[in-house]
Image (spheres, rainbow, N blue to C red):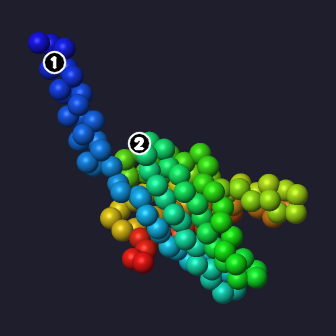
Amino acid sequence: MTKKLLFVTTLLLVLAFAAVAADVNGKWVYEQAGRGANGTPTKVTLTLKAEGGKLMGNSSRPGRDGAAVDTPITEGTVSGDNIAFKTSQDMGGNTMVTSYTGTVSGDEIKLKIIRPGRGGGDPVPTEVVAKRATT
């Protein structure tokens, strides 16, 4: 009897947690400030998929020639309404890793993005709000 009660309680807790966890699946869009914060903003699209506590997907933005630059997400996690992941790009032989942490609230994700500083300088934090894409 005790084992059955424990099993049912555990199952209910797991289901309750799943019901409260944020739905991050889909496309999310935010604008990244242009160079020096004065340039034309760039539209960035995140395509996210959560499976359990793992977050997968990619980040896509237009490149210099207008073609999309897709960057896979690595080390992605989901815990309740909180997400975290990294992306990396090769920039002239140097790997630049950008870290993202965020909180999902309905159709918005408040993201804190940490990019490496130029020339090995201090990391550059940015805060943006990504909105769920409707198309």
In the picture, measured across the screen, residue 110 lies left or right of residue 118, that is left
- Residue at the right extreme? 93
User: Circle 1 sits on which residue?
Assistant: 4
In this view of the protein, which residue sits in the foreground, 29 or 113?
Answer: 29
Q: Label 1 is placed on what type of residue? A: Lys
Q: What's the CA distance linking mark 1 and mark 2?
A: 24 Å
Is the N terminus in the top left, top right, bottom left or bottom right quadrant? top left
Give the image location of residue 84, x and y in percent. 53, 51
Q: Is mark 2 on a helix, strand or loop?
A: loop
Q: Is mark 1 on a helix, strand or loop?
A: helix
Give the image location of residue 134, x and y in percent. 39, 77
Q: Residue drawn 76% across and 80% down? A: 64
Q: Residue drawn 63% across and 80% down? A: 42
Task: Tell me which numbered mark, 1 or 2, is placed earlier along the sequence.
Answer: 1
- Up-down relation of residue 2 to residue 79 (above or below): above
In the picture, measured across the screen, residue 52 lies left or right of residue 16, that is right
Is the C terminus in the top left, top right, bottom left or bottom right quadrant? bottom left
Residue 101 shows in this picture: yes
Q: Residue drawn 66% across and 61% down? A: 71
Q: How crowded is mark 1: few (under 14 residues within 10 Å), some or many (20 or more)?
A: few
Residue 99 shows in this picture: no
In the picture, measured across the screen, residue 41 lies left or right of residue 46, that is right
Q: How crowded is mark 2: few (under 14 residues within 10 Å), some or many (20 or more)?
A: few
- Up-down relation of residue 46 to residue 32 (above or below): above
The quadrant where residue 105 appears: bottom left
- Residue at the left extreme? 1
In the picture, measured across the screen, residue 134 lies left or right of residue 12, that is right
Q: Label 2 is placed on what type of residue? A: Gly
The quadrant where residue 61 appears: bottom right
Give the image location of residue 34, x and y in percent. 68, 80
User: Circle 2 sits on which residue?
Assistant: 52
The quadrant where residue 17 appears: top left
